[in-house]
Amino acid sequence: MGLDTLAGRTPDIALTEADREAFDRAKVLLCECEGDTSFRGKVYAELVEDVTGVSLFEEWIPPEVVRRMAAELERCDPVEVAAGAECRYHVSPFEVVELGRFFRLCADRGLGLVGSW
């Protein structure tokens, strides 16, 4: 089963032009599905759940949960997390840092996450 994870103001996504521009400027480098405002959730789902305790396999993850997830990803040691990850897909320490950046950008803009599979 595939999973795409998209930033959104609501479960219907509803990003503003300013949101899109912020993601464009940030240039977060993850395995993308539909441009800078999303990533291939299935690639990172196990790692994100291991670090944050929250599954990406949700239709909607509200902004307050995304804020907590961002803090957890920023607190973790990317080298340790990448080395210890027993995921189906190889994830590098760089990608762990980029996940933290994506989640922080969402948190700072009051965005949640939309799961699509």
Image: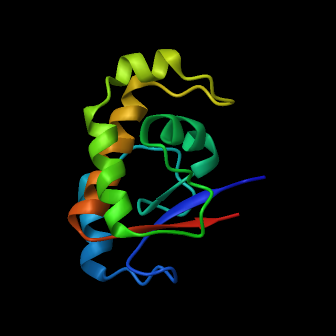
Closer-to-camera residue (57/33): 57
- Left or right: 49 in relation to 94: right
The way the protein has been coloured in the rendering is rainbow
- Left or right: 12 in relation to 107: right
**Outermost residue toward the right?**
1
Residue 59, placed above or below residue 32: below
Position of residue 39 measured from the top left corner of the image (x, y, whole percent) = 51, 53
Position of residue 109 measured from the top left corner of the image (x, y, whole percent) = 24, 69
Which residue is pictured at 40% across the width and 16% down the height? 80
Does residue 24 appear in the picture of this structure? no
Does residue 110 appear in the picture of this structure? yes
Which residue is pictured at 41% across the width and 70% down the height? 62
Write down the quadrant of residue 17 in the picture: bottom left
Residue 71, placed above or below residue 22: above
Position of residue 79 measured from the top left corner of the image (x, y, whole percent) = 37, 18
Which residue is pictured at 32% across the width and 23% down the height? 77
Position of residue 107 measured from the top left corner of the image (x, y, whole percent) = 27, 61
- Left or right: 81 in relation to 27: right
Closer-to-camera residue (70/22): 70
Numbered marks: total:
0
Which residue is pictured at 36% across the width and 59% down the height? 66
Write down the quadrant of residue 4 in the picture: bottom right
Residue 81, placed above or below residue 2: above
Q: Quadrant of the C terminus?
A: bottom right
**Outermost residue toward the front?**
53
Closer-to-camera residue (35/117): 117
